Amino acid sequence: MHALIIDDSRTMRSILSRIVADLGFAATEAGHGQEALDLMAGGLQPDVCLIDWNMPVMDGYTFVTKVRAEKRWRRITLMMVTTESSHSHVVRALAAGAHEYVIKPFTADAIAAKLRLLGLLDPSGSALDAGALA
Amino acid sequence: MSLSETSLRYVAELVHSRTSIRFDVDKGYLIQARLMPLARQAGVDLDVYVQRLAGDAEERRRVVDALTINETSWFRDTEPFRAFTDVMLPHLLAERTITQRIRIWSAASSSGQEAYSLAILCDEHLPPGWTVEIVATDVSETMVERVRRGRYGQVEMNRGMPAGTLVKHFTRVGTEWEISAPLRSVVRARHLNLADPFPELGRFDVVLLRNVLIYFDPSTRADIMRRLHPRLADDGYLLLGAAETATESSEHWRLERHGRISVHRPAGPAQLVGAAPTVPTTTATTGG
């Protein structure tokens, strides 16, 4: 399983990368939505994207709409991880095609719980094909 | 700041006397971690704080609360809730067509996530005309009050609450999320110490007693299981925590396996509390 972490904060990318790596994911980082799109256009095939909302160049909401507009990226799971905490933000993200929404601050087990909800973890709590990645 | 062994023993005995929950003194770090915020608030060293407890009933209640509140999450462990919607509800919908009413007891409800998770599932799965009543009980008055308020902080909401369910059933109130009034209205929260005789709560179709028996000594556990039996409908379901299920077998219960979880079901007709033990009608099994 491969996770693409999209956040303009290097610290936040590092925290999230470590959390998903502990769960057995390979992780790639991007500093904004356009950088993530470029990586994917270049052949990166993430199973899940963890996406901040407010970023320079391209924000997370725009990234979600762009990914959802492309048929070849339909199977990618999209999860917002953001400080935007209003009811309307969650509704907008889901309507645009995000599958899940985590509001900062979060704990490592909250990220794991959401990935489990999304069917990306096996019963032992590891990424589905973590064994294959090892 | 650290607690002396005398203080640890006093606190462990205090909690045991109020709740029957036993804290090993070698788990002093846990007691210390839970009491530290209270001692800080009082502005004294941990040991001084504990010494003052003998003369302060309100503070003793806070200590018991602090040591008996457990971490919880929405739809915790997933599988029991899947069994609820896939196995229990279909059976109850077929068997309760006259009353069209289902009663559930969340017997160690903590801050209410289990009770409200069930309320959400019932809202989504019960046909029109059916009603559900969920009784949420906890030994901590603080937790009972939290269940009544039905408000949760952001960190709590992140723990297992699907975003789609969040936007459907919660509204933002300040920095918290509040569960909708219709769902709050089906959950009735009240104080209850499982180690004490149960008050009149009526009979339930489903009882959840998850991850709490482990805190009691073996004789109290057996007593709770015996007193639970008549509280459950003859065709009802009792859900324990995964680690507790295998060890809590007795002649009163039979185990039924559903996917990866086991549920206890009454092995024979309910007996009245205080009545002489009945001869078991079915042999308990440990499930497959």
Image (cartoon, rainbow, N blue to C red):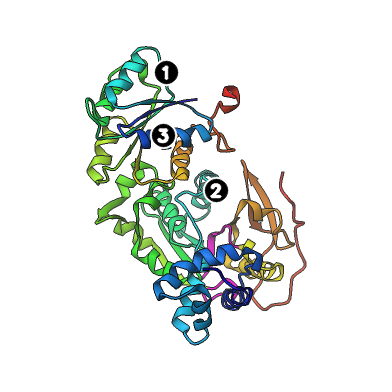
If you read the primary sequence from the N terminus, does the residue marked by circle 3 or circle 1 appear first? 3
At 47% from the left edge and 37% from the top edge, which residue is drawn? A19
Q: Is residue A88 left or right of residue B48?
A: left
Nearer to us of marks 2 and 3 is 3
Disc 3 is placed on an element classified as helix
Q: Chain of mark 1?
A: A
* Alpha carbon separation for disc pair 2 and 1: 34 Å
Q: Secondary structure at mark 1?
A: loop
Return the x and y of residue B74 as percentages of the image width and height: 44, 50
Mark 1, residue position: A45
Q: Chain of mark 3?
A: A
Residue nearer the viewer, B63 or B218: B63
- Classed neighbour count for the residue bearing mark 3: other residues with Cα under 10 Å, few (<14), some (14–19), many (≥20): some
Q: Amino acid at mark 2?
A: Pro
Residue A127 vertical position relative to residue B103 in the rendered view, above or below: above
Question: CB of mark 3 within 8 Å of CB of mark 1?
Answer: no
Disc 2 element: helix
Q: Which residues lie in the magenta part? A: B193-212
Say what amino acid the circle numbered 1 marks.
Gln
Identify which residue is drawn at 27% across, 30% down.
A60
State which quarter of the image contains the C terminus of chain A.
top right
User: Mark 3 highlights which residue?
Assistant: A14
Q: Is residue B263 above or below residue B164?
A: below
According to the picture, the residue beneath numbered tag 2 turns out to be: B80
Image position of B262 (left or right of A82) = right
Q: Position of residue A59 (x, y in %)?
A: 24, 29
Q: Is residue B18 visible?
A: yes
Q: Are marks 2 and 1 in contact (CB under 8 Å)?
A: no
